[in-house]
Image: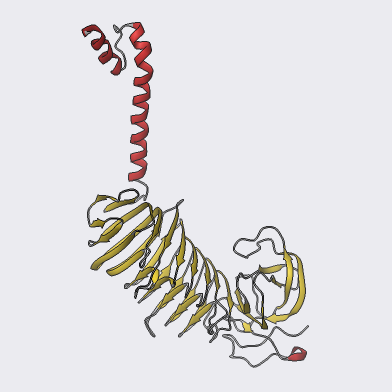
Amino acid sequence: MNENREAHVQVTTLALPDAGARSSKVFAPLAMLFVAMLLMQGLWLASAQGVAGVDATATITFGAETVIDGQGASADGAHVTIDQAGTYVLVGSSSDGSVTVDAADADVRLVLAGVELTNPNGPALFFKAAGSAAVTLQDGTSNTITDGGESEFDAALYSDASLTIDGDGSLDVHAVYEGISSTMHIDILGGSIRIFATEDGINANNDGVSHIDISGGYVYIETGIGDGIDSNGTITISGGTVIAQSALVGGNSGLDADGAITIDGGLVIASGGSMMGSVSADSSQSSLLIEFGPALLPDTLVTVRDPSGVDVVTFAPSQPFVEILVSTPALQDDVEYTVYTGGVGSGEAVDGLYADGASEPGTVFGTVTTASAVGGGRFGPSAPGGQGGPGFGPGGGRGGPRAP
């Protein structure tokens, strides 16, 4: 018994040379497997600890149990409260969970690093009190947030502080009311964000104060009864891709602002109802606003083609629409573009957008030009016979497309 026990001990320490050959053959593979498992576990832990690429105050893992590794946060089931400044990494999944930041005057950043979070009774992510609020979408990760029920904080991601979203990961937002909302400002610097909301997709609601600025990333929005992007102040888009589709009810549109709508760069497509205002004359990128009159059905292809036959934009909205705003660096002033409807796209569409243009453009709807001054499109259908309708000047009059 003692010899066997001694042999067993020696083998588990990688079999010293004087161990019995038979015992070594039996136990050595098990020992090697055990060491390999330890190494794999160590590598996994190292990967998990470095998943955000930042010095995290705490890592919060949702699952069968909610585990908080660090400080500044506490959990009641899968409902987490953060009460200190810092950077908090979120991973895992919960069908009944949320994160509430309640840290007045503190700077708090949430890093979404592969998290799927549903709150049946309010926001999935809620900045209740903070000096500044930031959400980073970790590179290479997919994230999903979903709200539910009825709450005065009526968005899947709701912030009572100015909100910044950045990173190179993706975020899907499913909302029973608004998708992303702030009582102050919203700045989107990066990330791939897809929002499916009953009401407004993105909303900043401080009257005359709020701004929504998008300078990078990819933003796709579908709404049921709301605007695509709605600011009680201003909207500025200077980069990235923005596709905002509103419901064709209640005077909603893809872009809606009480103040100026400024487009300085990026690809912008906004569809739905008619815009209440126009694009600012101070914009440094030209735009077209095409009014179709009677509503067109969802998935109706619209192609904007330049005089050389190149398709500038080929897009099929997922919602009924009477108007499409198009802005892209490819647009040029004093160039007449032809608008087609009902064609066939070339290749595969991504969120309704055909990168390869149209294989069959469809029926000519009319032609449209940008404004002569840099900074805005020439909007809406013209009078019969090709005469431009009344306009609002360089920032976006309601002229064109002309009748063919």
Q: Is residue 183 toward the left or the right of residue 225 in the image?
A: left
Q: Is residue 293 above or below residue 120?
A: below
Q: Please tell me in which quadrant of the rendered image residue 206 appears.
A: bottom left
Foreground pick, 356 / 224: 224
Q: Position of residue 96 (x, y in %)?
A: 36, 58
Name the image colouring: secondary structure
Would residue 65 be visible to someone looking at this image? yes
Q: Position of residue 341 (x, y in %)?
A: 72, 74
User: Where does residue 162 sit, x and y in percent of width and height?
Assistant: 34, 72
Which residue is found at the position 70% from the left and 64% from the top? 357
In the rendered structure, the answer to whether residue 371 lies left or right of residue 187 reads right
Which corner quadrant holds the C terminus? bottom right
Q: Is residue 274 above or below residue 43?
A: below
| Total marks placed | 0
Residue 110 appears in which quarter of the rendering? bottom left
Of residues 222 and 327, the one nearer the viewer is 222
Residue 56 visible in the current orientation: no
Q: Position of residue 297 (x, y in %)?
A: 66, 75
Residue 97 relative to residue 299: left or right: left
Taking 371 as reference, is 179 left or right? left
Residue lying furthest bottom in this view?
390
Q: Considering the image in quadrants, where does the N terminus appear?
A: top left
Q: Residue at x 35, y 64 (%)?
A: 125
Can you tell which quarter of the image residue 210 is in? bottom left
